[in-house]
Image (cartoon, rainbow, N blue to C red):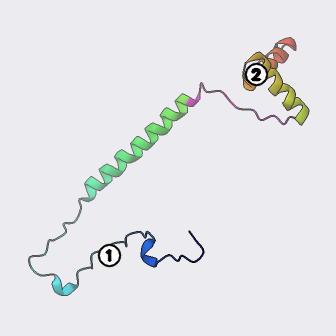
Amino acid sequence: MKRDEKLAAAEFLTAARKSQPAPMRSLENIGPDAPVRLESNPAADDDALQTRTDARKALRRLKQERMKGVQNFVNVHLDRETKKRLKLASFASETSMQFLVETAIRKFLDDNGF
């Protein structure tokens, strides 16, 4: 675009305007033909609530059962030099750093009789 050229407002793309929500009906528009909202059945609502509660509890129990065999995590603070050495060893041996740390911990525990 050259310096002396100017853009017109019509050349810019704009998003379409949001449609306005339907206006609410006033009390004057409601007559004998208006649909009547029936009251809900409290027993059915209690059954639905109980079903949801039971499902939630069952899901929580299932997750707890599944988590029993899952590994536990340990956070370890390493200085930069040790982290570099671990990363280099991981790269050289083509294994993950996690595997190396797990192996080292197991070896230490086995050697010390724990």
Kind of residue indicated by mark 1: Gln
Residue at 57 percent across and 78 percent down: it is 4
The image position of residue 9, as x and y in percent, is 46, 78
Of residues 101 and 9, the one drawn nearer to the viewer in this rendering: 9
The 10 Å Cα crowd at callout 2, few under 14, some 14 to 19, many 20 or more, is few
Tell me the mark number nearer the camera, choosing from 2 and 1: 1
- In the image, is 49 to the left or to the right of 41? right
Q: Residue at x 23, y 80 (%)?
A: 25
| Residue 42, image quadrant | bottom left
Q: Nearer the viewer, residue 20 or 39?
A: 20
| Residue 99 shows in this picture | yes
Q: Position of residue 37 (x, y in %)?
A: 19, 69
Q: Toward the viewer: 104 or 58?
A: 104
The residue labelled by disc 2 is: 102
Q: Give the magenta part as a residue range.
A: 67-78
Residue 3 in percent (x, y) is at 60, 74
Compared with 37, 88 (above or below) is: above
Residue 29 found in image quarter? bottom left
Q: Amino acid at mark 2?
A: Glu
From what the image shows, is residue 78 above or below residue 108? below
Mark 1 Cα within 10 Å, few/some/many (few <14, many 20+)? few
Disc on res. 20:
1
As drawn, is 58 to the left or to the right of 95? left
- Magenta: main secondary structure equals loop
Residue projecting furthest to the left: 33
Magenta segment includes 52: no
Task: Out of 44 and 82, give the one closest to the viewer.
Answer: 82
Q: Position of residue 87 (x, y in %)?
A: 80, 27
Q: Is residue 43 above or below residue 25?
A: above
